[in-house]
């Protein structure tokens, strides 16, 4: 386990105070959808230009100053959670910790220990919930002995989904580097999906509650290179399925292998289903920018009743595609219409009704591919790795987070499963022929 020691912490306040009329930020209806308190990420930067200790200290100063400027534009991020419906934009500031890592970045990347990544974050990654009064933004900057830097972010999921997190990170980096690409975020979500009560939170909590498990979980990182993805696409393509995407085929393949692991554990095939988080920004008319704050997402679902035809890869890819394509412009229009609550409730209840049946397995997928985390250049180069984090909780759900590899064509899947099922999955020869467990990010 790598040793990480927090040396100091402070509040980074916005460079200009938030105007009084903006002191209360109303959350949107869809901000009630996701139970996780944070969407954590760690981005790793090598010291490619041989910066000395004094240079690295200057980089820390630059990170703080540019964060202060960025918080002025993203002003809710400098506040605290006021209640389930709003953020108190009181300029308390972002929690900012500086930590020293007792190793070289190259040694860490070449000898990965996924449990160590948690130490680069300022918060625990679990489903325990974010309490009222908690800070919206928490950041930890970790400096390796070689001068490499890992920036860990835990920003409240009440205001950020993956796309918004990436937009913030890129804007912060652009401010630091002086590239001129820093933009002002779009705060339109609460007006598109206004929230006056907590009906969606209550409905979604019932649904998610039926899908959570108690016990020991394990998280492993599964990496698919471009050639393996091409093989999966070829295997899935046919008369009934053309041009499958890499997210579709990787999702379906992991689903297929996970079902096989459960069958081996239980002794028989079992019905299962998956959900996929769908970004609504390009499905809303007119379309929204990637810098639109909020959880502008909905949940697609796909079922497998354990019949032979469905268990083929092309059949599963078809199910994944069909589920995602249902969350289209027409569906979003209905979400925003007079019957929106009924449409959303029905969509969630269909997931909960199937998932709560005895003997049905659930797998939750979310894709952060093509969100541009590798574009965040603070002035000393782009990240060598953008990392998710494993779950650390006795209450968990089967969860798969898909992220780009550095080359942009591969996919790394952060897979959290029941510990026993994970041990079976790790030995799956079909899986091992197309993917690798926890390879070094530098091998991409």
Image (cartoon, grey):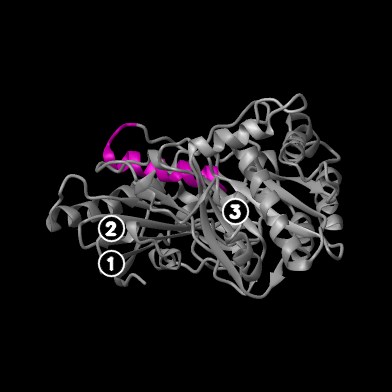
| Front of the two marks 1 and 2 | 2
Residue 204 is labelled as: none
| Between 212 and 10, the one nearer to me in the picture | 212
| For marks 3 and 2 on the same chain, the one whose residue lies earlier in the sequence | 2
Q: Is residue 208 magenta?
A: no
Q: Is disc 1 placed on a helix, strand or loop?
A: strand
Quarter assignment of residue 191: top right
Gap between marks 1 and 3 measured at Cα: 37 Å
Gap between marks 3 and 2 measured at Cα: 32 Å
Q: Which residue is under mark 2? A: 105
Gap between marks 1 and 2 measured at Cα: 9 Å
Q: Which residue is under mark 1? A: 101
Mark 1 near mark 3, Cβ–Cβ under 8 Å? no
List x then y, in percent, for residue 423.
60, 66
Q: Residue at x 84, y 53 (%)?
A: 349
- In-image side of 395 versus 50 (left or right): right
| Front of the two marks 3 and 2 | 3
Q: Is residue 165 magenta?
A: yes
Q: Is disc 3 placed on a helix, strand or loop?
A: helix
| Between 146 and 280, the one nearer to me in the picture | 146
Q: Which residue is under mark 3? A: 429
Q: Residue at x 82, y 46 (%)?
A: 347
Quadrant, the N terminus: bottom left
Magenta residues, start to end: 160-180
Q: Is disc 2 placed on a helix, strand or loop?
A: helix
- In-image side of 280 versus 18 (left or right): right
List x then y, in percent, for residue 40.
49, 57
Quadrant, the C terminus: top left
| Between 181 and 368, the one nearer to me in the picture | 368
In this rendering, is residue 177 above or below 387?
above
């Amino acid at each position: 386990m790598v040793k990480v020691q927090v040396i100091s912490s402070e509040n980074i306040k916005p460079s200009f105070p938030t105007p009084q009329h903006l002191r209360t930020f109303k959350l949107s209806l869809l901000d009630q959808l996701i139970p996780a308190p944070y969407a954590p990420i760690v981005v790793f930067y090598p010291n490619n230009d041989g910066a000395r200790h004094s240079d690295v200290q200057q980089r820390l100063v630059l990170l703080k100053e540019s964060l202060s400027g960025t918080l002025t534009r993203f002003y809710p991020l400098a506040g605290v959670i006021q209640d389930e419906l709003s953020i108190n934009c009181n300029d308390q500031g972002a929690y900012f910790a500086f930590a020293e890592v007792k190793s070289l970045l190259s040694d860490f990347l070449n000898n990965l220990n996924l449990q160590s990544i948690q130490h680069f974050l300022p918060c625990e990654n679990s489903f325990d919930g974010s309490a009222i009064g908690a800070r919206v933004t928490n950041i930890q900057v970790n400096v390796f002995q070689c001068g490499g830097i890992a920036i860990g972010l835990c920003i409240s999921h009440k205001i950020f989904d993956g796309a918004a997190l990436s937009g913030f990170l890129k804007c912060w980096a652009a401010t630091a580097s002086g590239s001129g690409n820093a933009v002002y975020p779009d705060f339109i979500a609460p007006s598109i999906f206004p929230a006056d009560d907590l009906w969606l939170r209550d409905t979604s909590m019932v649904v998610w509650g039926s899908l959570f498990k108690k016990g020991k979980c394990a998280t492993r990182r599964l990496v698919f290179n471009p050639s393996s993805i091409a093989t999966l696409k070829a295997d899935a393509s046919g008369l009934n399925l053309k041009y499958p995407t890499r997210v579709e085929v990787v999702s379906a393949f992991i689903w297929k292998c996970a079902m096989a692991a459960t069958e081996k554990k239980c002794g028989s095939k079992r019905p299962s289903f998956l959900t996929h988080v769908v970004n609504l920004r390009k499905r809303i008319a007119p379309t929204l920018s990637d810098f639109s704050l909020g959880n502008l997402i909905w949940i697609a679902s796909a079922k497998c009743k354990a019949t032979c035809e469905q268990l083929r890869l092309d059949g599963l890819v078809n199910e994944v595609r069909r589920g995602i394509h249902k969350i289209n412009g027409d569906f979003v229009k209905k979400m925003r219409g007079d019957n929106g609550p009924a449409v959303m409730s029905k969509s969630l209840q269909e997931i909960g009704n199937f998932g709560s049946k005895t003997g049905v397995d659930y797998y939750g997928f979310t894709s952060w591919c093509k969100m541009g985390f590798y574009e965040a250049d603070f002035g000393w180069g782009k990240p060598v790795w953008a990392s998710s984090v494993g779950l650390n909780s006795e209450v968990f759900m089967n969860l798969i987070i898909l992220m780009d590899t550095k080359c942009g064509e591969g996919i790394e899947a952060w897979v959290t499963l029941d510990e026993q099922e994970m041990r079976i999955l790790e030995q799956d020869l079909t899986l091992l022929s197309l993917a690798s467990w926890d390879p070094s990010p530098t091998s991409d």
